[in-house]
Image: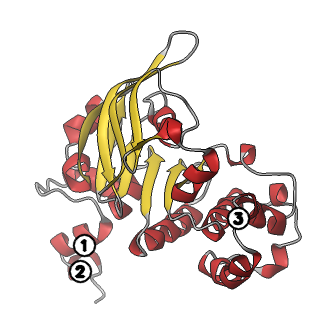
Amino acid sequence: MYLVKTENLVFEYPDGTRALDSISLEIREGEFVGVLGNNGSGKTTLAKCLAGLLKPTSGLVLIKGKDVKRYRMGELIRIIGYISQDINTQLLNVSVLEEILFTPRILNVGEDLIKDRFDEVLSQLEIGREILEKPVLSLPRHVKLRVLLASYLLAGTKNFIVDEPTTGQDWYHSIKFVEFLRRLRENGGTVILITHDVEILSKYSERVILMNSGRVVADGETREILCDLELLRMNSLLPTYTAQLAKEISIENCVLLPEELIRILGFKSLHPSY
């Protein structure tokens, strides 16, 4: 069963700029999909159309078989949550606790159910109780992301569109947040990750949709897309660092991850002391 489907989706901004041009795709429930592309490729516009935040100029966006325009926003949020690249625009000027409780309460989730889920969600996302009374806007970006995710989870949302969560974060916090997303997917959720970060996708996504100039130029298994160095070059993207290194030392096999390179070269050759 697909979660999201688009048919000949077109979106034009008021100035006539065509940001999406005849996009047709399906994303199944339970997938971890990366939407890859550089700035201006159309991936954020696509994300907002899928989340019901932008109305298509033409074509269809279907969520579980129903036109996204026919959903009430509260109804849609129960199915799929959107986390913006500019996360401050989604947060209220309130405490962490009030922010976490905001979405479930506007969706009329029962207080008993909120109480039952609350500690589990905090633990799942490693949100300490000591920050609950702090202003959410005063916190680092990586904590804000978890707070917003917690609010959705308390509301019962299990599918997510997440736009550039690694922007402005160090590698540790980038990996940490995407690990949270991976666990959600393992528990039956769907993750649509909007990014230009091939390193993250090589490690976590099972499928990549590559965009350029408002079009889908490739759609396939992550390894298939990220191992096509010419395809990446044509779309102004660099391969993973490991893939670049493997090419430099004349390894013909596709190598995306450091652990793959270690296996090919042999552990002892990289660590002579062993």
**Quarter of the image where one finds residue 42:** top left
Nearer mark to the viewer, of 1 and 3 = 3
Whole-angstrom CA distance, mark 1 to mark 3, is: 46 Å
- N-terminal of the two: label 1 or label 3? 3
Q: In the displayed structure, does residue 83 sit left or right of residue 42?
A: right
Q: Callout 2, which amino acid?
A: Phe
Q: Is residue 17 above or below residue 254?
A: above
Q: Residue at x 50, y 32 (%)?
A: 45
Q: Residue at x 81, y 60 (%)?
A: 136
Q: Callout 3, which amino acid?
A: Pro
Q: Callout 1, which amino acid?
A: Ile
The extreme bottom residue here reads 274
State whether residue 42 appears in this view. Answer: yes
Q: Residue at x 10, y 54 (%)?
A: 252
Q: Can you say which quadrant of the picture contains the N terminus?
A: bottom left
For the residue labelled by badge 3, is the local secondary structure a helix, a strand or a loop? helix
Whole-angstrom CA distance, mark 2 to mark 1, is: 6 Å
Q: Residues within 10 Å of mark 3 (few under 14, many from 20)?
A: many
Q: Which mark is residue 262?
A: 1
Q: Position of residue 186 (x, y in %)?
A: 40, 74
Give the residue pinned by disc 3. 104
Q: Which mark is residue 267?
A: 2
- N-terminal of the two: label 2 or label 1? 1
Q: Which mark is residue 53?
A: none
Q: Are marks 2 and 1 in contact (CB under 8 Å)?
A: yes
